[in-house]
Image (cartoon, rainbow, N blue to C red):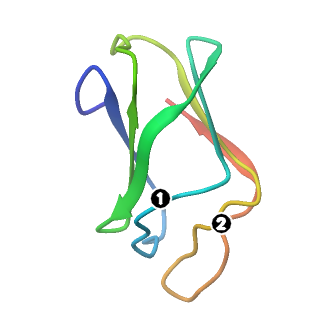
């Protein structure tokens, strides 16, 4: 968690930079929220939400048919990550 509206997802492999990420669903404390921005720079996904969340809230990011790829152009598989 970077601040009350932004969190970073780090992958085991570096992800290619992407100005606009598609195929994400974000759930904070069990509720689906729409990210205001989701970008990849430096191999990490940065997500900013409209509303504040607490650092203790559970965060789940689901990937489904996302446009994210690694350095070898392998697509990120459908699945989810959580804190």
Q: Compared with residue 10, is residue 67 higher up or lower down, i.e. above or below?
A: below
Task: Measuring from the top left, give residue 56's x and y in whole percent.
Answer: 39, 11
Residue at (67, 52) in percent of width and height = 23
Horizontally, residue 5 falls left or right of residue 21, namely left
Most foreground residue, 16 or 35: 35
Rendered residue at 42%/72% (across/down): 14
Which one is in front in this view, the residue at disc 1 or the one at disc 2? 2
Q: Earlier in the sequence, mark 1 or mark 2?
A: 1
8 versus 4 height, above or below: below
Q: Secondary structure at mark 1?
A: loop
Task: Give the residue displayed 48% in from the left and 84% down from the top.
Answer: 71
- Label 2 Cα crowd, 10 Å radius (few <14 / some 14-19 / many 20+): some
Q: Is residue 28 above or below residue 26?
A: above
Q: Position of residue 31 (x, y in %)?
A: 63, 14
Residue bearing mark 1:
11
Q: Where's residue 83, x and y in %? A: 49, 29
Instruction: Please state if 30 lies on the left or on the right of 9 as rendered.
Output: right
- The quadrant holding residue 16 is bottom left
Point 48% across, 63% down: residue: 12
* Residue receiving disc 2: 76
Q: Are marks 1 and 2 in contact (CB under 8 Å)?
A: yes
């Amino acid at each position: 968690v970077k601040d009350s509206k932004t969190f970073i997802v780090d992958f085991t492999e570096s992800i290619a930079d992407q100005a606009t990420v598609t195929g994400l669903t974000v759930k904070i404390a069990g509720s689906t929220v729409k990210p205001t921005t989701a970008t990849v720079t430096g191999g990490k996904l940065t997500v900013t939400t409209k509303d504040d969340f607490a650092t203790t809230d559970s965060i789940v990011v689901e990937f489904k048919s996302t446009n994210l790829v690694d350095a070898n152009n392998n697509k990120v598989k459908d699945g989810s990550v959580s804190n």
